[in-house]
Structures are given as structure tokens and as C-alpha cells.
Amino acid sequence: MSPRLKKVGEEIRRVLSTLIQQGNFHCRELERHMLTITDVHMSPDLKVAKVYVYPLTGKDQDIVLKLLADERKYLQHDLSRKMYLKFTPQLRFYLDDCVEQAHAINRLLNQPSVQRDIRDDAPEENE
């Protein structure tokens, strides 16, 4: 991704995070969910923004994605008022599974058999 795409994506992430934090949604059910926007990937022509989100509770992921899709037009409108781009990108929301992957790796590393292997592979202090 080019530096310009990264810069625009990061600015969109920042603005959307602020909008979500303020919680001025048309759908009141969306206000009940705490979300984080982990990343935004821009298309090369800057007309599509893939927004990666994760509900902080880890629950109701499908519901959150549907609610965000329903709220998309309002968020795009608010985004167009906060940013000065030739075109306001179409927002597409995706679940970011990096958080779940990190939890799975952490669970794996904390298993007794893995901990035993880690201790067995540790170098001796007297060597």
C-alpha cells in the first residue's frame, strides 16, 4: 500500500473512531456495543474503504456488522463533513479476527505442555 493510501486510511480510522466514540447513531442498538476500529484499507482509487472492526466484548459480532452496514450511509455522510476528499469513500465493514487469533495463540502458549517445553529449552545460567 502506498504512503498516501495508508495516510488516508489512518485518517478515516481516526475520524470513524471519534464518531463511534461519540455514539451519535441513528440505530440506538449500536450504541450498546463498544467497538474498536483496528484498521482501514483503502482501494487504490480511494473510493472504497475496508473498515476492520472488533466488538470489545467479543460477542454479537454478526449483529454488530449488520448494524454498522445499516448505519453506513450516515457514517459516510458524517465522514464527508469531517474530511476533505474529492470523493467520500464507500465504507465496507469487516470483522477483524486478529484479536481472536492473538487470544488463541496466548491460550496455546499458556498450556502446561508448552510451558514445560519452553522451560526445558531455556539455556542454563552456568553455561
Image: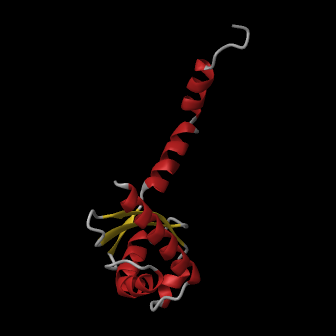
| Quarter occupied by residue 8 | bottom left
- Viewer-side residue, 33 vs 89: 89
Image position of 69 (left or right of 126): left
- Viewer-side residue, 116 vs 76: 76
Image position of 110 (left or right of 79): right
Quadrant of the snapshot with the C terminus: top right
Q: Please give the name of the residue rendered at 34% of the width and 69% of the height, measured from the top-left corner.
A: 49
- Residue at the far bottom: name it: 26
Q: Please give the name of the residue rendered at 48% of the width and 86% of the height, measured from the top-left corner.
A: 29
- Give the percent coordinates (x, y) of residue 34: 55, 74
How many numbered circles does the render carry?
0
- Give the percent coordinates (x, y) of residue 99: 49, 55
Quadrant of the snapshot with the N terminus: bottom left
- Residue at the far left: name it: 45
- Residue at the far top: name it: 127
Query: 103 above or below 47?
Result: above
Query: 43 above or below 87?
Result: above
